[in-house]
Amino acid sequence: MAADNAVGQHTELTQLADERVDFRFKGLPPDADGLTVGELAAQGRNLFTGGFTTPVLALSAECVAHNLALMETYSTRHGLAFAPHGKTSMAPELFARQERHGAWGITLAVPHQVRVARAHGFRRIFLANELVDAAALRWLAAELTADPEFRFVCYVDSERGVELMDAALREAGATRPVDVVVELGAGDGARTGVRTEAECAAVADAVATAPTLRLTGVAGYEGEVPQADPERVHAWLRRLVALAAEFDKAGRFAGLDEIVVSAGGSAWFDAVADVFAEIPELSAPVLKLLRSGAYVSHDDGHYKELTPFNRVPEEGTLQPAFRLWAQVVSRPNPEQAFTNAGKRDAAYDLHLPAAQVVRDARDGSQRPATGIEVTGLSDQHAWLRTSPEADLEVGDWVGMGLSHPCTSFDKWQLIPLVEADGTVTDYIRTYF
């Protein structure tokens, strides 16, 4: 990570620039071995002529910057706090950039991810899961004791979960209560969360008897609403808001400086904005916390189809930032070619990669990937079907768009951040 991209309080991020480049990081120039990441970034090498090997995943610097700014504007316009889901990238530098663009904090899913964020200095973490692991709770208790400015919030969705949390925190000698929000499930057949309002009240009652916990709000994930459509999603979000109001009326939030109401994936944040605008005045200010995460890179498949900006184009447009570059290593016949990137390199759980551009190995010129279709992936090869207009030969580079950011980031430990002219300005370190 380039030193000039370090963000404010996160001095821990400077350690990323000091990491040595070597064989662990695929795609990087072999002659860069021994340099620090910061030294390599300072060289400003070109992705195509600077010694990078294929396959190599690139993130567009311009698209990432655009997406960060757009969601900052969107959140501000709709009066939402923003804790983007960090499990998308697991990249502390991107977390810091998200904070620089107005994020309240970072959402995470499991204890390991929280440890990564804490190791890099992040002090506001929302864990979108119930935490019942005793070892993780002991660690959390120590973190809360050591850092009075550390704010942590997590789900509770069962009385048994509350019992396990309380027992582990008592055993750990916790000195600060852990803030929890009751997770309202999205319906029968959905993922986690309490299914009925009566059961939510029972979980809240259990929290009230646990001195190691403090009830601070309600939350959930509208992306799990069965047969989701605008009407069903809006209806569930209104249930969530009504639950917060009912809890407040019953005095469950007495003494709080702030009540948390949280939802929001990457497919329905427009519905969250609509319904959270209807939250009535409660006994304390409401932190309306949106948690969408895939926006930072967006994609050329799943989220390109699902993004709410398709429904509200006047609000803006996200830009896909990923491009996977692979090299043609076999051209056995005019209808077929193979590149050297496969399942180990490309997301394939939702859609196959899409060929977008060809870089000619002879003269470096680029042209659209006309007549080229990715039809399958082996572990280390992409299968290409080619028509006569493809004009493809061994040695050419093929740039492919990817679907599903979460399973794109997790295949690469160090990702070049590339400007439109091919200059690599930075490297994004991931921790999966």
Image: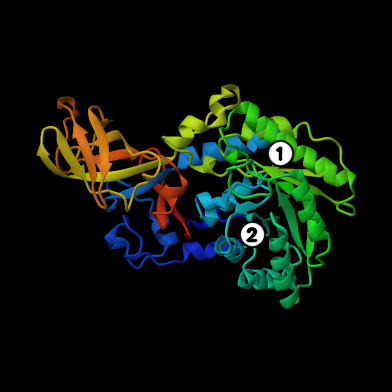
Is 277 displayed left or right of 359 in the figure? right
Residue situated in front as seen by the camera: 429 or 38: 429
User: Which residue in the protein does label 2 denote?
Assistant: 122
Look at discs 1 and 2 and give the one toward the viewer.
1
Q: Residue 176 sits in which quadrant?
A: bottom right
Is 403 displayed left or right of 143 in the figure? left
Residue at image point 90% right, 49% down: 251
Q: Residue 420 sits in which quadrant?
A: top left
Under tag 2, what secondary structure? loop
Residue at image point 22% right, 37% down: 384
Q: Position of residue 47 (x, y in %)?
A: 32, 47
Labels 1 and 2: the sequence-earlier one: 1
Q: Residues within 10 Å of mark 1 (few under 14, many from 20)?
A: many
Q: Position of residue 338 (x, y in %)?
A: 19, 43
Residue at image point 33% right, 51% down: 345
| Placement of 138 over or under 309, stated as above or below | below
Tag 1: amino acid:
Leu
